[in-house]
């Protein structure tokens, strides 16, 4: 038998084998146990997260002759036929190449007929967002009123391209990106089973490059095994992925910090000569700077995987770089990343970026010392003291001096300004279901952002949601200020959120430690009208004559009795 790729050999055959999607597999198993399965399902999520695998497991579970605790046994004739693709009652269709009206009409016509061997006829339509508008319309009626013996399972990576009429007729399950820790754990299991040696750091490099996709991770692992003669080393993993070690990145940024242009430029030349991808180098640098920033602001947010890849050089850089320097360096790298997409000479832009980074990494200018007292200032100070003494003598002799006008102190506005006019309408229409739906898609929303923007939004969390608005809290006020001032980020967040939810809510940012106070104030505002009414009824109005006397003589005027004759 010919060699099969790892992701095919180790494709999950039961729900318990699926990595990182516990909530979805548990829901489906419970539905199978209780007999509450739906006629149509929609599986959405990034590539390589298990959508098609779960669809095939569900097809087996619906028809398994010996279903046990919601799991197919994989030994009965139906399960074996589905595994080898010989069962005609389970039809898998690629919508990318079968996206016309005629193909969907054919499915609709054949769905009327009962299955030949299985209990339920299952249609698995992959990449369903590729269907044409006419094909969706042809499928709509069948999804709304399907035959009792038919189940549709739709899978897609772009749910925002599917009409809302289709989504509303299905049970939607959102597959999330698999964590690097889970990916590493799965690769360890596979390599141990195959009795292949490996470096633990190499698996972490592969998991980081996979970006949440298990299939991508196994494909990279396959390449590394072929490259390294069935031994997984860190050097081989870096060569295959095009990545750079954190030690090299730290050395490069140390040269930048020291303004050693020659050393930094030599490192760029050597990396490009070794075949490293310029775009990947920029991404690694941005992620390294992000880790520096997070380590300075909130060290607890660094994951175990990220911490394990850092060294002593990282700690030194974290102590010497200022946050303002890191922000500017990320902006420089982000601009360079955009420029690399439109050039055939990446080395030029990398060299220019290196010089700009070195110029950026200069120490922050400290406040200048107060100037020494000049003769003119001494004379002025003496004159002020003299006038002050004269004033005291006048007051002591019974003289009257008009008090200086009292200036109202204005509190310095905090950087994280709270926009209550925007927050209160959202709270008025907020529901628990809207918040739950938003939290489900929030990881996918962050995954759509660039590395720079994702680093800023990693410490954010939605705390309230309505159909027209979302309130997002941040743990640190510096990030609230930066995000509020980033118009491009706010626009991208609202656009991406519209694609994921089909709505266009307005996003309002708030600091997490201020949020409880705002919520309490809003509740008090709801009670305020009643309180104001009671106060108005109990407090008598001041007669106009009394008001006039108070205006003329002040609050300390002699008591005057007003008779109402």
Image (cartoon, grey):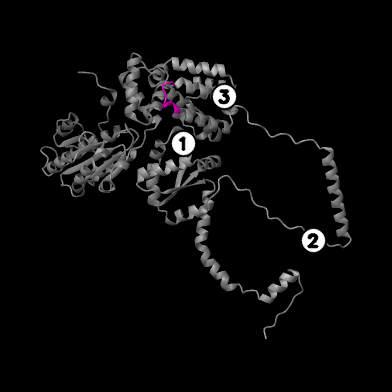
The residue at which mark 2 appears reads as 402
Circle 1 sits in a helix, a strand or a loop, which is it? helix
Mark whose residue sits in front, 1 or 3 = 3
Can residue 311 be seen in the rendering of this structure?
no
Q: Residues within 10 Å of mark 3 (few under 14, many from 20)?
A: many
Q: Residue furthest bottom?
A: 565
Q: Residues within 10 Å of mark 2 (few under 14, many from 20)?
A: few
| Quadrant where the image shows the C terminus | bottom right
The answer to whether 39 is drawn above or below residue 557 in the figure is: above
One can see residue 159 in this view: yes
Which of pointers 1 and 3 lies earlier in the amino acid sequence?
3
What residue range appears in magenta?
339-345
Provide residue 416's location: percent of width, then percent of height.
Answer: 55, 45
Q: Residue at x 53, y 21 (%)?
A: 252
- Quarter the N terminus occupies: top left
Q: Which residue is mark 1?
A: 453
Q: Tags 1 and 3 in contact by the CB under 8 Å rule?
A: no
Dots 2 and 1: beta carbons under 8 Å? no
As rendered, which of 59 and 274 lies closer to the eye? 274
Residue 78: % across, % down: 15, 34
Which residue is disc 3 drawn over? 358
Q: Answer with left or right where residue 200 lies relative to residue 195.
A: right
Q: Earlier in the sequence, mark 2 or mark 3?
A: 3
């Amino acid at each position: 038998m010919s060699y099969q790729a790892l992701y095919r050999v180790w494709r999950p055959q039961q729900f318990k084998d699926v990595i990182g999607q516990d909530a979805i597999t548990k829901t489906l198993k419970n539905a199978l146990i209780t007999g509450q399965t739906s006629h149509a399902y929609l599986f959405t999520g990034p590539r390589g997260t298990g959508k098609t695998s779960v669809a095939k497991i569900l097809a087996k579970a619906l028809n398994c002759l010996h279903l046990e605790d919601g799991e197919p046994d994989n030994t009965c004739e139906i399960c074996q036929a589905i595994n080898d693709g010989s069962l005609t009652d389970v039809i898998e269709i690629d919508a990318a190449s079968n996206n016309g009206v005629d193909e969907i009409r054919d499915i609709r016509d054949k769905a009327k007929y009962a299955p030949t061997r299985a209990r339920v006829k299952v249609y698995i339509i992959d990449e369903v967002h590729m269907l044409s508008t006419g094909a969706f319309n042809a499928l709509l009626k069948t999804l709304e009123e399907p035959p009792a013996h038919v189940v549709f399972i739709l899978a897609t990576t772009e749910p925002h391209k599917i009409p809302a009429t289709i989504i509303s007729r299905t049970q939607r399950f959102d597959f999330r990106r698999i964590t690097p820790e889970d990916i590493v754990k799965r690769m360890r299991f596979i390599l141990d089973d195959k009795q292949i040696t490996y470096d633990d750091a190499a698996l972490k490099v592969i998991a980081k490059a996979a970006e949440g996709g298990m299939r991508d991770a196994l494909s990279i692992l396959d390449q590394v095994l072929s490259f390294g003669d069935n031994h997984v080393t860190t050097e081989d993993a870096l060569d295959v992925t095009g990545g750079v070690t954190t030690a090299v990145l730290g050395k490069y940024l140390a040269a930048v910090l020291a303004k050693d242009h020659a050393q930094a430029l030599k490192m760029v030349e050597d990396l490009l000569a070794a075949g490293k991808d310029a775009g990947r180098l920029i991404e690694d640098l941005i992620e390294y700077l992000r880790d520096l920033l997070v380590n300075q602001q909130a060290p607890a947010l660094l994951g175990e995987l990220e911490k394990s890849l850092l060294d002593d050089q990282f700690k030194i850089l974290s102590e010497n770089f200022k946050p303002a320097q890191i922000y500017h360096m990320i902006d420089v790298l982000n601009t360079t990343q955009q420029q690399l997409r439109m050039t055939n000479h990446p080395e030029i832009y990398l060299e220019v970026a290196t010089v700009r980074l070195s110029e950026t990494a200069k120490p922050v200018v400290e406040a200048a010392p107060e100037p020494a007292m000049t003769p003119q200032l001494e004379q002025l100070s003496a004159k002020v003291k003299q006038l002050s003494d004269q004033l005291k003598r006048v007051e002591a002799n019974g003289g009257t001096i008009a008090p200086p006008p009292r200036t109202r102190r204005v509190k310095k506005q905090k950087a994280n300004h709270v926009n209550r006019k925007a927050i209160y309408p959202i709270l008025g229409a907020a529901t628990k279901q809207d918040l739950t739906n938003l939290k489900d898609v929030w990881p996918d929303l962050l995954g759509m952002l660039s590395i720079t923007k994702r680093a800023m939004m990693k410490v954010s969390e939605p705390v309230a949601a309505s159909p027209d608005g979302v309130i997002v809290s941040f743990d640190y006020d510096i990030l609230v200020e930066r995000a509020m001032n980033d118009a491009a980020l706010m626009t991208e967040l609202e656009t991406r959120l519209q694609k994921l939810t089909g709505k266009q809510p307005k996003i309002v940012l708030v600091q997490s430690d201020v949020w409880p106070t705002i919520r309490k104030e809003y509740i008090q505002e709801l009670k305020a009208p009643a309180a104001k009414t009671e106060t108005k009824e109990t407090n008598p109005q001041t007669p106009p004559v009394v008001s006039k006397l108070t205006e003329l003589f002040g609050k300390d005027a002699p008591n005057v009795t007003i008779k109402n004759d």
